[in-house]
Image (tube, rainbow, N blue to C red):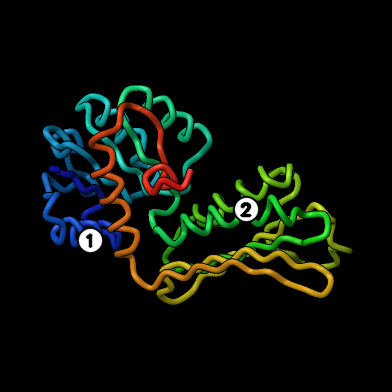
Amino acid sequence: MNITVTGRSGRMGQSVLAAIEAEEKASVHATHDNGEDLLAAITGAEAIIDFTLPQLTDELLEAAIQAKTRLVIGTTGHSDQQREAIRAASSVIPIVYASNFSTGVNLLFHLTRKAASILGNETFDIEVTEMHHRHKVDAPSGTARTLLEILNEETQSSYQDDVTHGRFGDVGPRPSREIGMHTLRGGDVVGDHTVMFAAEGERFELTHKASSRMTFASGALRAALWLSEQPAGLYDMQDVLGLK
C-alpha cells in the first residue's frame, strides 16, 4: 500500500514513517508538512495517515474526497462541527477515525465499558486521569475524552452536566453521578490513562501507560492496511481489532 503521511516533521509523523519503513506491505507515497501542496501529496496514494492539528482537517477531508483516498485520522481536539464533517466524508471514502491507535488502549476502552456496565456510578465513584508531555495542546486528551464518552453511555450520564474537570475551592460533597476528569502535563510522557472506580472499602483501577509513540504509529499503519478491504464508512480501532 502506497501511503501519504501528513505532519512529516512532527513526532508522530516521524514515528509513522519509521513504521512504514519497517512494514513490507507498505511504502511511503509522499509526505506533507505545513505550507506544502496537500492535494499533490495525496494524489495517487492509496491511503493517508494523519497526525497533525485540527486546523488541517477541513482541507484534508476535501482533498481526500477529491483524490478518492482512504484516510486514517489520529488527530485529536476536533470541534463537533469537524466531527460531523468527518462523518459526512465517510459516506464517500473509508475512514478510520480514532483517538488512540494503541492495541492496549483499545482494550482499555473495551474493559472500561464492561466495568462501567457492571459497577455503575451509584455505589462506585468514577474518576479519570491522564498525563501527557508538556507540548500537548488539547486537554483532556482525545483518549480521555473517549473514555468519558464510554462512561457517559454506560452510566446514562452527561458530559456537559456530570463531568467535572478538576476541583478547586469549597466544592462541597461529591455528587453521586459526577465523573471527575484530571489532566496532567509535564516532561516527555507519551501517554498515561487511568479509570478509577472507588466505593466504600474497595477501589478498582484500569490503567494503560505508553512508553513509545511507535505503538500508535504501528496501530495507525495496521488501520490503513485494514482499510484496503473496506467500503466507504466511518470506522475506529475497535473495528480494526475486532473488539466490537
In the figure, is residue 121 to the left or right of 80? Answer: right
Image location of residue 23, percent across then percent down: 16, 57
Mark 1 or mark 2, whichever is nearer to me? 2
Three-letter residue code for mark 2: Lys
Q: Looking at the rendering, which quadrant does residue 103 occupy?
A: bottom left
Which residue corresponds to the image point at 25% horizontal and 34% vertical from the top-left?
229
Image location of residue 167, percent across then percent down: 74, 64
Image quadrant in which the N terminus is located: top left
Image location of residue 97, percent across then percent down: 40, 41
Residue tagged 2: 114
Which residue corresponds to the image point at 71% horizontal and 43% vertical from the top-left?
158
Three-letter residue code for mark 1: Gln
In the figure, is residue 146 to the left or right of 91? Answer: right
Q: How many marks?
A: 2
Q: Is residue 173 above or below residue 201?
A: above
Gap in angstroms between the C-alphas marked 1 and 2: 35 Å
Q: Secondary structure at mark 1?
A: helix
Earlier-in-chain disc, 1 versus 2: 1
Say if mark 1 contacts mark 2, CB within 8 Å: no
Which residue corresponds to the image point at 57% horizontal and 57% vertical from the top-left?
111
Residue tagged 1: 14
* Nearer-the-camera pick, 113 or 146: 113
The 10 Å Cα crowd at callout 1, few under 14, some 14 to 19, many 20 or more, is: some
* Nearer-the-camera pick, 215 or 40: 215
In the figure, is residue 37 to the left or right of 170? Answer: left
The 10 Å Cα crowd at callout 2, few under 14, some 14 to 19, many 20 or more, is: some
Which residue corresponds to the image point at 27% horizontal and 46% vertical from the top-left?
49
Q: Secondary structure at mark 2?
A: helix
